[in-house]
Image (tube, helix red, strand yellow):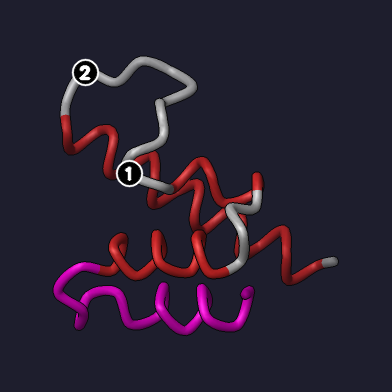
Amino acid sequence: MYLLLKKLYDNKNHIADPYGLVEQIYADFDYPEELAGFIRWMPATEPVATLEEGASRMDRKWQNYLETAAIE
């Protein structure tokens, strides 16, 4: 799962809907809790004012997951 998400993150600017692929990975791995923070249809844990702010927060959570999982 980590390798798929890392490769996708590294190439997300070249993919039309990277978060759609993240959601597929989320489903394929039986909805792991550690990915919930960067799944578009999951409720936000903190309020967001704009779509851009929400997207930026999801991107940071994705990056944080990759950094944390790489250490483990």
What is the chief secondary structure element of the magenta stretch? helix
Which residues fall within the magenta stretch? 1-17
Residue 58 locus on image (x, y percent): 39, 45
On screen, residue 4 versus residue 39, left or right, reads right
Residue drawn 61% across the image and 66% down it: 29
Residue drawn 39% across the image and 59% down it: 23
Q: Earlier in the sequence, mark 2 or mark 1?
A: 1
Question: Which residue matches tag 1?
Answer: 40
Residue 48 locus on image (x, y percent): 29, 20
Q: Residues within 10 Å of mark 1 (few under 14, many from 20)?
A: some
Magenta stretch containing residue 7, yes or no? Answer: yes
Question: Is residue 26 or residue 55 the one in the foreground?
Answer: 26
Residue drawn 53% across the image and 81% down it: 4
Residue 49 locus on image (x, y percent): 21, 18
Q: Residues within 10 Å of mark 2 (few under 14, many from 20)?
A: few
Above or below — where is 56 with respect to 18? above
Above or below — where is 54 with respect to 34? above
Question: Is residue 9 or residue 26 the one in the foreground?
Answer: 26
Image quarter (top left, top right, bottom left or bottom right) of the N terminus: bottom right
Question: Which residue matches tag 2?
Answer: 49
At mark 2, the secondary structure is: loop
Image quarter (top left, top right, bottom left or bottom right) of the C terminus: bottom right
Residue 61: give its label: none
Above or below — where is 26 with respect to 33? below
Amino acid carrying mark 1 in the image? Arg
Residue drawn 18% across the image and 38% down it: 52
On screen, residue 7 versus residue 50, left or right, reads right
Amino acid carrying mark 2 in the image? Ala
